[in-house]
Image (spheres, rainbow, N blue to C red):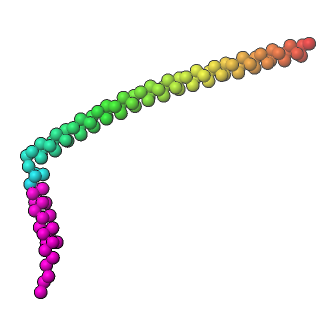
């Protein structure tokens, strides 16, 4: 004969009952309102994150442009200093040769 494990059968039946009740609860109007409000909150958060990301990108572009301008000015100054040094060395060499 078939030997039934009543404990396992009870657990299975409880799971089916709980699952069926859960589906009805999850499909209720109140649950749908909760889902809708949660989805709306997520969409608001998404908009906020996108706005913040846009601001950060704009600031990064400004910083990059300023950094490039600083480096260009520095390079020009170094070139001017090198040219001035060369001229000073040439003048010094010419004075040494004349003496």
Which quadrant holds residue 13? bottom left
Q: Nearer the viewer, residue 10 or 36?
A: 10
Q: Is residue 42 left or right of residue 6?
A: right
Q: Nearer the viewer, residue 31 or 91?
A: 31
* Membership of 30 in magenta stretch: no
Residue at (89%, 16%) from the top-left corner? Answer: 97
> x, y percentage for residue 26?
12, 51
Residue at (15%, 67%) from the top-left corner? Answer: 11
> x, y percentage for residue 44?
24, 35
Image quadrant containing the C terminus: top right
Q: Is the magenta stretch mostly helix, strand or loop?
A: helix
* Membership of 3 in magenta stretch: yes
Residue at (48%, 28%) from the top-left corner? Answer: 64
> x, y percentage for residue 34?
14, 43
On screen, residue 4 above or below 86 = below
> x, y percentage for residue 9?
13, 72
Name the residue at the bottom extreme: 1
Q: Which of 77 and 52 is in front in this view?
A: 52
On screen, residue 53 above or below 84 = below
Residue at (10%, 62%) from the top-left corner? Answer: 17
Image quadrant containing the N terminus: bottom left
Q: In this view, does 39 lie to the left or right of 87?
A: left
Q: Is residue 41 left or right of residue 77?
A: left
Residue segment shown in magenta: 1-23
Which quadrant holds residue 37? top left
């Amino acid at each position: 004969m078939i030997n039934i494990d009543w404990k396992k059968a009870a657990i299975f039946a409880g799971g089916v009952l709980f699952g069926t009740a859960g589906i009805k609860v999850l499909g209720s109007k109140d649950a749908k309102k909760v889902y809708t409000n949660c989805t709306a909150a997520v969409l608001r958060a998404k908009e906020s994150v996108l706005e913040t990301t846009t601001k950060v990108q704009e600031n990064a572009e400004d910083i990059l442009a300023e950094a490039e301008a600083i480096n260009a000015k520095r390079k020009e100054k170094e070139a001017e200093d090198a040219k001035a040094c060369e001229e000073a060395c040439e003048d010094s060499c010419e004075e040494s040769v004349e003496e």
